[in-house]
Image: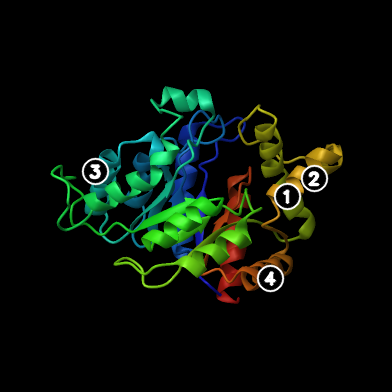
Amino acid sequence: MIPLSILDLAPIVEGGTASDSFRNSLDLAQHGERWGYKRFWLAEHHGMPGIASAATSVLMCHVANGTSTIRIGAGGIMLPNHSPLVIAEQFGTLASLFPGRIDLGLGRAPGSDHTTARALRRNLASDADEFPQDVVELMDYFADSPRRQVRAVPGAGLDVPVWILGSSLFGAQLAAALGLPYAFASHFAPQMMMQAIELYRATFRPSAQLDKPYVMLGFNVFAADTDAEAHFRATSMQQAFINLRSGRPTRLKPPVEGYLDLLSPPERSMLDSVLSCSAIGSPATVSAQLKGFIERTGADELMVTSQVFDHAARLRSYEITADIARGS
């Protein structure tokens, strides 16, 4: 099977704290390393009561320091929130502390609502339009001989692979034009997935970083010993999406028996759409769904996310998925 990686949203569960989340993130990364996952990525979100990874590079350092071989990355840094120089310095620092293990995924969304985005000192009218130029500027800071007078120290001359993240055709076009690997957010925005993959592969231009297209797709997995338990565990993520889309984001809630039966038809339809790239079930069920998704998309790698309330059950989901990948 293709390589599998972990996307951790550093969930803060109902009744828990950010400190609990950070301990669980490190524990998951350590288990993932032993189970053979290739990467462990964290995502930048702000003002979200159920997500603790706002200071993404700081949390990456915590996780990298407690692991030894798994690649640690941002999936992603929302670049319009930051100066490219500051991100180059942060990731140059990470790459100096943990050589050969740091990935930098870049997105152009704010990772927050508009009010929070303004509090981040964003100019919402122009920042997204400047994203391609900001990516090029950031990559130049990592070059052996940067074109700019300002240098990133540390940063210049360091090997920090850059990825473009996206959920639309914009990111696919940019990744292809710059010759960068492309990570599509199919785990929550799958509607344009196949179009984006096709466009990226068709228009890809080789670069110094990458000689051929490389597609990584987000994929939800809720694996358990039985189909019934897996569907029960998945209701925490389903509640999170309904609450977020209703404008009332919360901490990750405990699972609820029969949750889908409590939803209105529009809510059920929304979940069916946004979570269509998911595998939910026993090992046999998840194996078939994983293999079917890979065959359909031709993905080079999957970034697996499993938003499960109980940490032990979340570990079990990733363990089952790793066993499937190893063919055991």
The secondary structure type at the circle numbered 1 is helix
Classify 10 Å Cα crowding around label 4: few (below 14), some (14-19), many (20 and above): few
Residue, disc 1:
273
Q: Position of residue 277 (x, y in %)?
A: 67, 57
Say which quarter of the image contains residue 282: bottom right
Residue, disc 4:
292
Classify 10 Å Cα crowding around label 3: few (below 14), some (14-19), many (20 and above): many
Badge 1 vs badge 2, beta-carbon distance below 8 Å: yes
Q: Position of residue 210 (x, y in %)?
A: 36, 68
Q: Amino acid at mark 2?
A: Ser
In the rendered structure, the answer to whether residue 205 lies left or right of residue 172 reads left
Of mark 3 and mark 2, the one earlier in the sequence is 3
Residue, disc 3:
89
Of mark 3 and mark 4, the one earlier in the sequence is 3
Q: Amino acid at mark 3?
A: Glu
At x 29% / y 67%, what residue is drawn? 208
Of mark 4 and mark 2, the one earlier in the sequence is 2
